Amino acid sequence: MNQVFSVVEEAARRTPVRYDCDVIVLGAGSAGAAAALAAARQGARVLLIERHGFVGGIMSACSLGTICGLYGIDANDEPYSLVGGIPAEVVERLHALGGAAAPKRWVGAVTVPYDLFLLKVAFDELLREAGVRVALHAQFVAVSSAHGRVEAVFIEDKSGRWAARAPMIIDATGDADVVHAAGGAFEYDLSTLQLPTTTFRLGGVSEAVARSVGRDQLKEMLEVANERGAGLPRTCGGVYFQTPGTPHLNLTRITRNGNPPNPLDTFELSDAEFEGRRQVLAYHKAFREFVPGYTDAFVVDSGIHIGVRESRRVIGDYQLTLSDVQDGRRFEDPIALCSWPVEVHESGTQTRWDWLPPGVFYQLPWRCLLPRGLANVIVAGRCLSATHDAHGSVRVTATCMAMGQAAGTAAALAAAGQLSDIRALDYQILRESLVAQGCLLDADPARTAATSCCE
């Protein structure tokens, strides 16, 4: 961050409280939306704050192209369900809207391609049906806190600055903004952060021809492009079709002088946005010249902002580790399951993929959502408590939504019980509620086989 050499004094102010409720959720990405839904369905009065004009976060703003983490692969090389509850319901709603393709087998995983616009509609419908009060175009800026409790959050929008109060707060900002503002514990090592990506879509593609190009073939073609001066930073990545003839591409890789750009620095992030769009043009040119099916391709759009994979990670009551992931560890307080590989986007043209053995999955403990030093704040999404390597596995969409459902359910139960500290909530009560909502806290591949056939 740039050093500040001088200051400007601000006058003291009195901020109006525009909303009192039971649960406030900051950030309406996949985790935040699921948290708000779960809390409202438990009878809580919920306020959901989001800086964009839509819900879905990275899924909607950048388009991930496909929903990851819903399935595992068993010892017989067959998919089985790892996530139920709200994530599965979102997929069902997408199917009903015509916004999700059949599950797609991809190397050692199964993913679900989705339509960017219809995902926004699906979340709109679900949140309205649940009675969540949503404040879009509203930016979280600060907290009022004392003795480890957040008493109020401060919001700024076109009308000015206002406050909201609730006994339970969920930080689903992705960057742990609430935890940071309230003085909670977190880690942030700029030197090890995963590199961000500008995602984009192409139109005018001959889909049948393009789909015939396998992952390894595409890598070879892009490496040939580089040999001829294309200057592509990454030659192995994802190309997903949901809308006919309009693939989503996850390929760019943004660095700053060979290092990760600082996602918490406005100026470095702005430079990264420029670089991302420059890379989109370079990939567009390379695909037209070197990849079959893309001769007449054109750029439809890119994400509305760069896709940040990692920033602050809270230090919670438990920190998920790489050995927990690789060993398929079980815990006494599980709230979600995951078998996604350790996917780390580092410097170089390749991506690190450490695949779990077939049939192996791990449980995510509830304690990973409880930041040290704060009594009434729960986190959900990619800012959870996990080491850098473990984070490369657990940060995927379906798992983030499962975290959100657990966080929202717990917050509603704690508010209803008038608990001053979220840690006073009996985990068994939380577990029973999650199971009743269809969440999977353990799995038997033989009993949870995926019913949909993969492409």
Image (cartoon, rainbow, N blue to C red):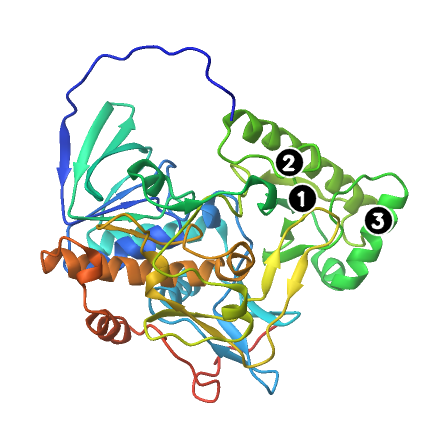
Using the image, determine if residue 146 lies above or below residue 67. Answer: above
**Residue 426 position by quadrant:** bottom left
Residue 81, percent across and down? 46, 76
Q: To which quarter of the image does residue 337 belong?
A: bottom left
Nearer-the-camera pick, 317 or 429: 317
Q: Position of residue 323 (x, y in %)?
A: 54, 69
Question: In this orientation, does residue 438 appear?
Answer: yes
Asked which secondary structure carries label 2, the reply is helix
Callout 3, which amino acid? Phe
The amino acid marked with disc number 1 is: Thr
Residue 360 in the image, given as x and y percentages of width and height: 53, 78
Q: Rate crowding at label 1 as few (under 14), some (14 to 19) or many (20 or more) other CA atoms within 10 Å.
A: many
Mark 3 and mark 1: span between their CA atoms? 17 Å
Q: Which label's residue is closer to the chain start, 3 or 2?
A: 2
Dot 2 and dot 1 residues touching (CB under 8 Å): yes
Q: Is residue 376 left or right of residue 71?
A: left
Q: Which numbered circle lies on residue 173?
A: none
Query: Distance between the Cα atoms at labels 2 and 1?
Result: 7 Å
Residue 260: image location, x then y, percent: 62, 39
Residue under label 1, please give it.
Answer: 252
Number of callouts: 3
Callouts 3 and 2 close, C-beta under 8 Å: no
Give the residue at x 83% y 40%.
Answer: 230
Badge 3 is on which residue?
290
Check disc 3 and report its element: helix, strand or loop. Answer: helix
Of marks 2 and 1, which one's residue comes earlier in the chain? 1
Q: Which of the marked residues, 3 or 1, is nearer the chain's N terminus?
A: 1
Identify the mark at residue 276; answer none if there is no mark.
2
Amino acid marked by disc 2: Gly
Q: CA distance from mark 3 to mark 2?
A: 21 Å
